[in-house]
Amino acid sequence: MTKNIIEVKNLTKKYKENIAVDHLSFEVKEGEILGLLGPNGCGKSTTINCLLSLLTINEGEIKIFDKKMTPNAYDIKQKIGVVFQDVALFDELTVIENIDYFCGLYIKEKEKRKKCIEDACKLVGLEDYKKYYPKQLSGGLLRRLNIACGIAHKPSLIFFDEPTVAVDPQSRNHILDGIKRLREEGATIIYTTHYMEEVELLCDRIIIMDQGKIIASGTMDEVKALAHNHEKISVQIMNLEEETKEKLLKKIQKLQGVIAASFENHTLLITAENGTEILETLMDRLKDFNISYQHILMMPPTLNDVFLELTGKELRD
Ligand code: ADP
Ligand code: MG
């Protein structure tokens, strides 16, 4: 059994009458990347700030490394790395000096620190920018430096709060690869984002939040199984008479497991509970109607489908 690194019970945080985090309970297991996914304002940053004891909580219990988390729990804090949503760096210091400063808060020995800084630079691909000042760096490189500063002391538990917002694709890849590497090296990671593709790429388990509450959690497959609209099928059919379209649609809509079917220009769109079974029947029907098609695509449900089904709104903002 993998042990829990974080245990949260009934965590509630209010800003005056606004409940930002509403009775949240969850665990984070050793060595996993847990994705905290949800739209802007759903409470991700507040949750992280509560876990770090940066905010006083209204209700609940937080345990990290099997100990109660408090503002003075320096033994716990020593083993934590945080990469905040907003970049915080010293403009007067170079890349290396910035990392050295933050790393120096944890590691006193100069030689040991040098190695840590070297590793951190490598992890996010900043080797060629060591002598640069923040002002000389692009937004993506600043983000990478912000990460290097947060993880250089080799913490065993790391919080990343939306580290890829407004970042160019190259920096984004560096960041995601770096985070995967940190997990390979044994770190436990909490990753917040409102980009579901990142969660799919990176996370072992996810928690989907909306309005301060957990609305779904589990592995990617477990969460996706919550979407009843399981699969989407699209078939491109050219030169089809309106009359035939209607007849075909009627047949398809009657098939068991089909939730919706419609035509959008030359594309037949079907949402179904069991795509694979429907696909076979669909091909037979097309044959019956003597219809030839250009191509067929079957798409598994996305996290957005799950979110849409559970909340009635799109995850994208
Ligand atoms: P997320 O990180 O998911 O975008 P936040 O945790 O920042 O969400 O915000 C959750 C809710 O709490 C939002 O309604 C936000 O407006 C509110 N909130 C966040 N920080 C503060 C604050 N310092 N004072 C008052 N309300 C806040
Ligand atoms: Mg936030």
Image (cartoon, helix red, strand yellow):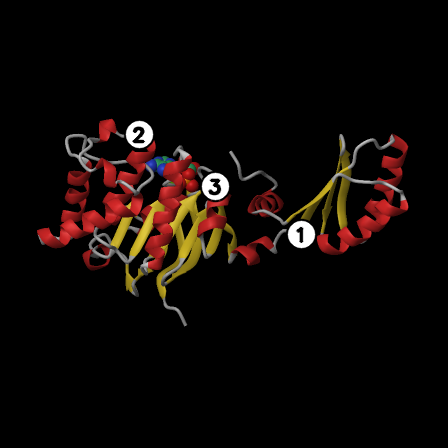
Mark 3 = which residue? 195
Residue 228's disc number: 1
Residue 138's disc number: 2
Please provide percent x and percent y for residue 264.
74, 32
* In the rendered image, the vertical position of residue 161 relative to residue 78, given as above or below: above
Q: CA distance from mark 1 to mark 3?
A: 22 Å
Residue 275 can be seen in this image:
yes
Instruction: Give SS at disc 2.
Output: loop
The amino acid on which the numbered mark 2 sits, given as a three-letter code, is Ser
Label 1 vs label 2, nearer the camera: 2
Q: Residue at x 44, y 49 (%)?
A: 36
* In the rendered image, the vertical position of residue 315 relative to residue 138, given as above or below: below
Of the image marks 1 and 3, the number of the one nearer the N terminus: 3
Q: Pick whichever, 75 or 122, lies toward us.
A: 122
Q: Pick whichever, 52 or 206, lies toward us.
A: 206
Q: CA distance from mark 3 to mark 2?
A: 21 Å
Label 3 vs label 2, nearer the camera: 2
Q: Residue at x 59, y 38 (%)?
A: 313
Residue 96's disc number: none
Q: How many marks?
A: 3
Which quadrant of the figure contains the N terminus?
bottom left
Q: CA distance from mark 1 to mark 2?
A: 43 Å
Q: Residue at x 77, y 41 (%)?
A: 261
The amino acid on which the numbered mark 3 sits, given as a three-letter code, is Tyr
Decide if residue 240 is on the left or right side of residue 185. right
Please provide percent x and percent y for residue 258.
77, 49
Q: Residue at x 13, y 54 (%)?
A: 112
Of the image marks 3 and 2, the number of the one nearer the N terminus: 2
* Circle 3 residues within 10 Å: few <14, some 14–19, many ≥20: some
Decide if residue 211 is on the left or right side of residue 96. right
The amino acid on which the numbered mark 1 sits, given as a three-letter code, is His
